[in-house]
Amino acid sequence: MKKMLILGLILAVGLLAGCTTTQKGALAGSAVGAGTGAIIGHNTHHGAGKGAMVGALAGGLVGALAGDAYEQHQDNQQNRRRQAADRYASGQFTTYEDMWE
């Protein structure tokens, strides 16, 4: 069992290496959500296995969506800052608010 867990972790790290930051955010969110959902589902349902499975699926989906949304927000902020810095460097008028929205 330990060997399978270690093999799974190594495989997950290998797959993460090729992901973009948005994919990493979605993957991290889904992993946290699935783990949390499995624990909650296991502890709240009479059929512990079924509850854990449903909780993991629901938590994984919600976590993936939340992680993806967060990473997209971060990417958008970074792009706006870069554009504001480019406008400033080119001599175009820029306000302080434009740079830090």
Image (tube, grey):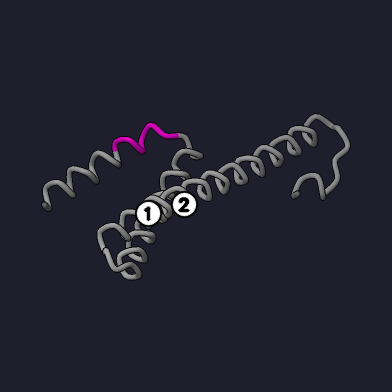
Circle 1 sits in a helix, a strand or a loop, which is it? helix
Measuring 85% from the left and 40% from the top, which residue is drawn there? 94
The image quarter in which residue 91 lies: top right
Which percent across, then down, holds residue 87?
A: 79, 33
> Which dot marks residue 53?
none
Q: Is residue 51 left or right of residue 27?
A: left
Image label count = 2
At label 1, the amino acid type is: Ala
Which percent across, then down, holds residue 13?
A: 30, 41
Measuring 38% from the left and 50% from the top, which residue is drawn there? 57
Q: Main secondary structure of the magenta part?
A: helix
Q: Is residue 35 left or right of residue 78?
A: left
Specify start and end residues of the magenta stretch as a single range. 14-19
**Contact (CB < 8 A) between labels 1 and 2?**
yes
**Mark 1 lies on residue:** 34
Looking at the picture, tell me which residue is in the foreground, 55 or 83. 55
Q: Is residue 31 left or right of residue 72?
A: left
At label 2, the amino acid type is: Gly
Which percent across, then down, holds residue 15?
A: 32, 35
**Mark 2 lies on residue:** 63
Q: Is residue 2 left or right of residue 80?
A: left
Mark 1 or 2, nearer chain start: 1
Circle 2 sits in a helix, a strand or a loop, which is it? helix
Which percent across, then down, holds residue 7?
A: 17, 43
Relative to 48, residue 76 above or below? above
Measuring 52% from the left and 46% from the top, which residue is drawn there? 65
